[in-house]
Image (cartoon, helix red, strand yellow):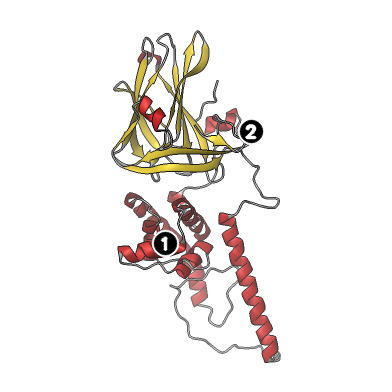
Amino acid sequence: MGVDAEGGEGLQIAGEPPAPGLESVTRHEDLVRLLAEEFARADVSLRELEARADKAGGTRLPRATCADMLAGRRFPKKAVMVAFLRACRVPEQRLPAWEQAWERVRIARLPALTGQATAPGQPAAAGQPTTTEAPTVAAQPAVLPHDTAPAPNPGPGRRRMLVVAMLASLAAASLGVLAGFWLPGRGPSEPPRGRTVTDDGRAFGQGGSSRFTVTVDPANTGVRLIRRLDAGIGMQRATITVNGVPAGAWQPLHVERVYRWKDQSADIPPSLTSDRRSLTVVNTFVSSYQDFNEFLYVVKQKVNGVWSTADTVDVGPEHAASESAHGYRITGPQTFAGVQEFAYPPPALSGLTAAARAGNVPLP
């Protein structure tokens, strides 16, 4: 079971995020943000990414190139982006979606690039993105109005001061972009702080499934599965069977970029749970942006009209005893096994309405 920052344990319902997923990205800044998230999830250094790419062969990943890409200073070539994602251990089946996102952003940038190419001699507008793929335009002499005299040529010292000021501004802007990815939010736009929880879990991908057995009271008139998941991986869908009979599905949720812990619920039909002392649950992967993850299962049961906890399955490499006691195992490709630390939303953001929109059911 996960432990929060204050040492407490338990579940909390998360609200629905408004942020778009990879399939709807059309802007350079959104693509940069998603690349930065993959880099954070990989938990490696730029030096390690460069070494992995060199070992794999093909497109190289110089550290400076990766830093520029993650800071949004330069729009990457598609081959560089794909090599970066492979070095971050993004599954191969997800790469086509990244390539399509790159193509949409590239097409959306064409008008800006065309404007650059047709305006030789003019400075780029403030905030105008640069690209290594922009057409090369020969420099043209500036044409001044007839009644305008050229500005005096500044001396070497003044030119040096101007260059230093420009470089300082660029460095500050770059650090600001990176801080937006890696540092906690600050200032008036900082989101409310949620409860931080550290928990270990597992995940599986295409062709995979998980299985475990839980105990319930045979007098139950309803059973509810509650799963803690990392909603930073969006659109996770899996079917549920109980004792070999279809019992429902885990519905896909949108990507959560701030409060990544969610507790999603699935009600099992009473016809599959009544008069039974044990239930064998199988979750089978259907689709996801990356994989299907699970950190904790709480099994609720309704007996004599009252809901209570029937069983708990703590998933993860640090909870081998709980996994063994419940016969937990993954069949097929396991894509993750480790510890994550995320936050639940504060109570003000996790009410009944938000939970219903996110496909969750609040705990009784």
Can you say whether 217 is above or below 180 in the image?
A: above
Q: Can residue 283 be seen in this view?
A: no
355 left or right, relative to 249? right
Residue name at image x 35 percent, y 54 percent: 95
- Residue 140 spot, x, y in % from top left: 53, 87
Residue name at image x 60 percent, y 72 percent: 125
Q: Name the residue under label 1.
A: 48
Q: How many marks?
A: 2
Which quarter of the figure has residue 85?
A: bottom left
Can you say whether 97 is above or below 141 in the image?
A: above
Which quarter of the figure has residue 291?
A: top left
Which quarter of the figure has residue 288?
A: top left
- Residue 56 spot, x, y in % from top left: 31, 62
C-alpha gap between disc 1 and disc 2:
39 Å
Q: Can residue 263 be seen in this view?
A: yes
87 left or right, relative to 359? left
- Residue 100 spot, x, y in % from top left: 38, 56
- Three-letter residue code for mark 2: Pro
Residue name at image x 50 percent, y 47 percent: 20
Q: Name the residue under label 2.
A: 347
First of labels 1, 2 by sequence position: 1
Whether residues under marks 1 and 2 lie with C-beta atoms below 8 angstroms apart, the answer is no
- Three-letter residue code for mark 1: Glu
- Mark 1: secondary structure: helix
Residue density around tag 1, few if under 14, some if 14–19, many if 20 or more, within 10 Å: some
Residue name at image x 59 percent, y 28 percent: 352
